Image: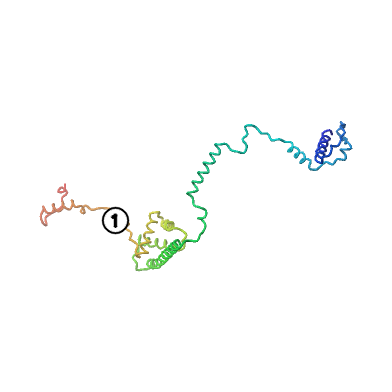
Amino acid sequence: MPQYNRCKKHLARLVAQKKQEPPPLANDSSSSSESEINLTDSEADFDIPKNAFEELMAEFKSNAKPTVLSYIRGHDSCRKTKYRYKKAKEELMRDAETCQKITTFFMTTPTPTQSSQLLDIGTEFQKQKTCREDAIAPLKKLLESKTSNLVGQDRTRHFAVLHFLYLQKYQPWKTRQELALTTANSLNKGKHVAEKIITWECSWINNRIIPEGRQGRHEKISSWFNDENVMLAVREHIAGYGEGKWFLNQESFD
């Protein structure tokens, strides 16, 4: 095939140039028949290299010339791009000044002042923990006592404080607000009762007293006889009839 012969001639020329040898002479005659291939003597003795593609690419790269146009800037950025990069860098530097350094997140040797502060915090925490644990036993004893007068809302308050103390003992990783809200939710109450439970707990730890509940103990109906003007009118009416001879008449108050 003519195309195959031309490829072989080209490869032979490349190898000859590489070895600095004159290219072999090849016969230009080729058969027009597609079933037969006529090779010259020089082509028959020539070995086709296995890396023919690499040879072609090497020749292309050696002869290729870069195309440089007048409007191509190259690797350097324009003035506006440089200005934008500079502004972004300055903004990052300003933000970095207000941030903590990464070294602050690693453990360092505390100073004597910091050591004393940590020791005081640990001592105070242990003291509070001991006070809470000491307050559990008397409160539990009071609730189990048969002679106590705790009923209704007062007994519920004591139970809530005891539950709150137990939660702090067995779940120390949670905050007091979270545990108080958990206790209030167990009583079907909300945030207001949770704040009251914390207050009742402090009162019990310090004074061993929980304030009594006043729910239902306020007067909802006021009597007329508690009004000062009504009392004066009644006294005048009684004094007008004399001692032992008075009676209430609605027309007298009109």
Q: Position of residue 77 (x, y in %)?
A: 58, 38
Q: Position of residue 27 (x, y in %)?
A: 87, 33
Q: Position of residue 118 (x, y in %)?
A: 45, 62
Relative height, residue 117 to residue 7 (above, below): below
Q: Which residue is mark 1?
A: 218
Image quadrant in which the N terminus is located? top right
Residue farthest to the front, as pictured: 20
In depth, the one of 35 and 107 nearer the eye is 107
Question: Which quadrant of the figure has residue 166?
Answer: bottom left
- SS of the residue under disc 1: loop
Relative height, residue 68 to residue 184 (above, below): above
Please state which amino acid type lies under the numbered disc 1: His
In depth, the one of 15 and 143 nearer the eye is 15
In depth, the one of 20 and 104 nearer the eye is 20
Total residue callouts: 1
Label 1 crowd (10 A; few <14 / some 14-19 / many >=20): few
